[in-house]
Image (cartoon, grey):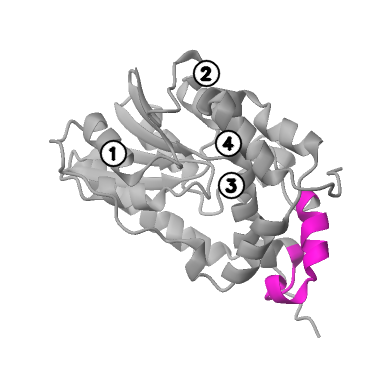
Amino acid sequence: MRRKIRHKPRPFKNWRRGLRHAVRLRLALAAGRRVVLDHQVGKVGSLSVARAIGRIPGTAVFHSHWIPPRDLAAGPRTDAERALMTDQDPYGFGPRLWRHVLTPGRPVDVVTLVRDPVARNISWYFDLLDKFWRVRDAHRVVPAPRLHAEFFDRFDHDAPVRWFDDQIREVYGIDVYDHPFDPGVGWAIIDQPPVRLLVLRTEATDDAKARAIEAFFDRPAGSVSIPARNVSAAKPHAAAYDAFRRTVALPEAYLERMYGSRMARHFFAPEELDRLRARWRRSPAVAPA
């Protein structure tokens, strides 16, 4: 029998974790450390990059997926806005970042990563599979055909293609699409005071990422290395995840939605997008609603 699970709010645990982050932030600001926001959509491989930055003397790295846009900075005004803030930022840390780092106009460094949106969505799906299906060990108990068919219905697939508008533009006032990005290089620095933004492609080599970090933080060549990643292969659902990636066939409408987006066309070369489309276009599949 399947063991149903209920994902109830954990207010005390979330409050405690948010408080811990807030204390770290206050101490870093008081000590005059260089505050770096590792701010990205999630499941883009940022942990190894954040660890590399954290090894640079004088830096303090803070990880976040969502900071309230400027029109929500004073607090949510409707139940829908309140629910959005709770869902995207369960620890309540985003508003603190806004109040103590961004609102005063203090110089801040932001590092973000961008990844193939389809690969990101599949990774997101499997990392939260039990939550989406509300059953323990969903990768074992839910038949593979259902995992494939209902992939489209379980979460917001457009989050990675909207994220640079919803977060980077609305929060920091930087429109990344106004700035050139060379997919062959794999990274770019945007300097728009008081914010400096480093955009990295997840698919870039570790060497390219290290060189980007050195350029962004003005470090000597060879002084930065990227530590080992927390790869999905080490997780309990690794075999199911690998099988899903090898067998899932995505409909043309979905591929166009992802790879025809402004985000994909800005950060990926046309020939890369053609290869990605071919990778996922294996045979007819159930079309998303």
Residue 247: x and y in percent read 71, 58
Real-space Cα separation, disc 2 to disc 4, in angstroms: 28 Å
Residue beneath disc 4: 75
Q: Element under label 2?
A: helix
Reply yes or no: does residue 146 show up in magenta.
Answer: yes
Q: Earlier in the sequence, mark 1 or mark 4?
A: 1
Q: Element under label 3?
A: helix
Q: Element under label 1?
A: strand
Q: What residue span does the magenta drawing correspond to?
A: 133-152
Q: Earlier in the sequence, mark 1 or mark 2?
A: 1
Task: Please state which of residues 190 and 186 is positioned toward the viewer in this rendering.
Answer: 186
Residue beneath disc 3: 120
Task: Please state which of residues 107 and 3 is positioned toward the viewer in this rendering.
Answer: 3
Residue beneath disc 2: 177
Considering the whole magenta stretch, tell me its main secondary structure: helix
Are dots 2 and 3 in contact, CB under 8 Å?
A: no
Residue 273's place in the image compared with 243, above or below, is: above
